[in-house]
Image: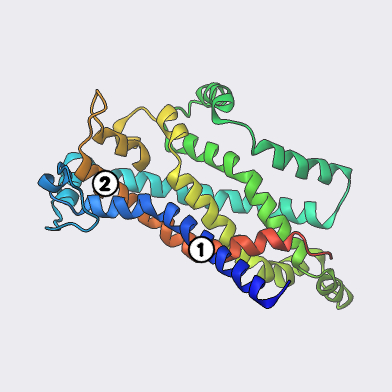
Amino acid sequence: MSPRTRRTARAGQYVALLCYLVFLAFPFLWLISTAFKPAPELGSLHPTWIPEHPTLDNFRAAFDEQPLLRAAANSLIAALSAGIIAVVIATPMAYVMARHRSRLSTAATGWVVVSQAFPFVLLIIPLFLVLKHLHLINTLWGLIMVYVVWSMPFALWMLVGYVRAVPRELEEAAAVDGASRLRTLVSVTAPLLAPGIVATALFAFITAWNEFFFALVLLKTPEKQTLPVVLTHFLGAEGASDLGPLAAAAFLATLPSLVLFAVIQRRITGGMLAGAVKS
């Protein structure tokens, strides 16, 4: 391939990537624009990208109409608890799966991948019956249990990749020096896994923060509903919506996910690629 052809191909790739980024960014940019538009501009027949008279009235109305702070607190409790519990359970499981390869661990890895293909509709009825038997319907702890189970497969997949990226020679050297298996795990392996553990916990947090379907079905009391469910209250009975406050509330609800994903996106990619490293 000639240098000119390579430059043309590279330019085409950049143009395609730019178009894809514009396609992905359009809804969020329009959401921001809508959140700061006054009511007359929202009903205009000739909408503009940049608000002509930006206002914060939509944000004030959003907090006045719905209990966003209480819903955000519920989402924070559920997401934070799910992230911590998922990591605590998944870390030792991932270590065993990565270090002790067998037919059982291979089958477990395959089950982890297959389980991600199950649709929510197939799971919600069994989950509802189990939680009802445990008297956990309409409780945040019941929702947290569901989030932990749902995020566990991907958390295991990520952590197995990080464990495999840690050289076995480090653990063998510690064993030669007289360190026990527990001491080796705590002093040698765990510090090297810290970035992966943090990235996995943040991923579980983001997944739980944005989840809507399980929270809608399992939480009935308004005081316990999470932020994604409360956002639907801005919609009227016949599909009419209070567009300005809805856009403002949705923008605020999206910010934590965007910030956290910007922080962990490189670590997530590293965890996926680490699983391909041959130990």
Q: Residues within 10 Å of mark 2 (few under 14, many from 20)?
A: many
- Quadrant of residue 217 in the image? top left
Q: Which residue is mark 1?
A: 15
Q: Residue 102 versus residue 132: which sits nearer the camera?
A: 102
Tell me: 269 left or right of 73. Answer: right
The percent coordinates of residue 118 (x first, y second) are 63, 32
Q: Amino acid at mark 1?
A: Val
Residue 7 seen in the current view = yes
Tell me: 170 left or right of 17. Answer: right
The quarter of the rendered structure image containing the C terminus is: bottom right
Q: Amino acid at mark 2?
A: Ala
- The residue at 43%/37% (across/down) is 212
Element carrying mark 1? helix
Q: Label 2, label 1: how many angstroms apart (C-alpha)? A: 30 Å
The percent coordinates of residue 108 (x first, y second) are 78, 42
Point out the tag, 2 or 1, that comes first from the N-terminus: 1
Element carrying mark 2? helix
The percent coordinates of residue 227 (x first, y second) are 34, 42
Tell me: 72 left or right of 171. Answer: left
Tell me the mark number nearer the camera, choosing from 2 and 1.
Answer: 1
Q: Which residue is mark 2?
A: 247
